[in-house]
Amino acid sequence: MKSIILVTAGLLGAASAYGQTIKPGVNAPIAVSATIVTEGAPVVQQLPNGGNKKTYAVTSVRFTNREILEAMRAANLLDGSVSGWVLTRFTNANDVGNLYAAKQGKAAVAVPAALLTQPVVQGKADSGTTTKDTANSPELPALTRRAYTTLTVKAGPGSGIGTQTLKSAVLKIGTSSNTVITRTESFDLSGKGGTGNSIYTGTYKVQRANPINLTPYFPGVAVP
């Protein structure tokens, strides 16, 4: 069953302030939590018989939303601060979009692919239903998907395995009703680090997906 989402007058006012056409879509905040483990250069000890002994050690660093936003701030992609910025997946009504840094009153800023890419499904097993109200209407999902995905974390190729939930919702803006596809997901991540001998493990989660008017975040002709 479709859920009904009512848009407040505040959102309508924001769209009017930008003087733009309404852009129905979805705002789905993401949470990334990973640990990157890197092998250091070995310490070599010479042995009396001419051989040697090498001692290896590793260092571990966290890689989360905070580190991604700090890297974007350092690259002058934000407004000089990480305060008020969040990471989210903005998508159009058909669940097509990308990862962005978002802040109230600011245009969305795409997350550089070298920092993080969204999981791309490579294999799946769905349960649930899809419905077409008429022969020419869009297919609306009510699915739970078990999925194997690929992505990049801090320039390191990796994969994620977990679940996605796909649903449809009706976004009401004024007198218009717009059907949008929402998606939540949770993946356990692992991969090869982007530098040196390193690996990473962690999680990627989207726990809610909110139908909204995207115009304040994508003024002009911009779209997710």
Image (spheres, helix red, strand yellow):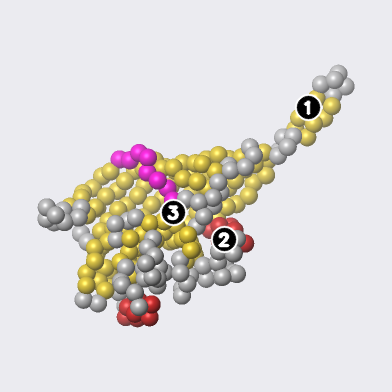
Q: Which mark is residue 217?
A: none
Q: What's the residue type where badge 3 is placed?
A: Lys
Answer yes or no: do the residues labelled 3 and 1 have beta carbons within 8 Å? no
Residue at 55% in and 46% down:
155
Indicate the amino acid at tag 2: Met
- Give the class, few, some or many, for how many residues have Cα within 10 Å of label 1's Cα (few <14, many ≥20): few
Q: Residues within 10 Å of mark 2 (few under 14, many from 20)?
A: many
Q: Residue at x 67, y 38 (%)?
A: 39
Residue 107 falls left or right of residue 60: left
- Please state the extent of the stretch shown in magenta in the rendering: 118-125
Query: Tag on residue 72?
Result: 2
**What kind of residue is marked 1?**
Lys
Magenta stretch, overall SS? strand
Residue 41 in which image quadrant: top right
- In space, the residues marked 1 and 2 are separated at their CA atoms by 42 Å
In what quadrant of the picture does the C terminus appear?
bottom left
Q: Relative to 104, is 221 on the left or the right? A: left
Of pointers 1 and 2, the one earlier in the residue sequence: 1
The crowding category of the residue bearing disc 3, from other C-alpha atoms within 10 Å (few below 14, some 14 to 19, many at least 20), is some
Q: Secondary structure at mark 2?
A: helix
Residue 124 on the magenta span: yes
* Residue marked by disc 3: 205
Which residue is painted at 50% across and 46% down in the image? 152
Left or right: 114, with 184 as reference point: right
Residue drawn at x 20%, y 59% is 1
Which residue does the numbered mark 1 point to in the structure image? 53
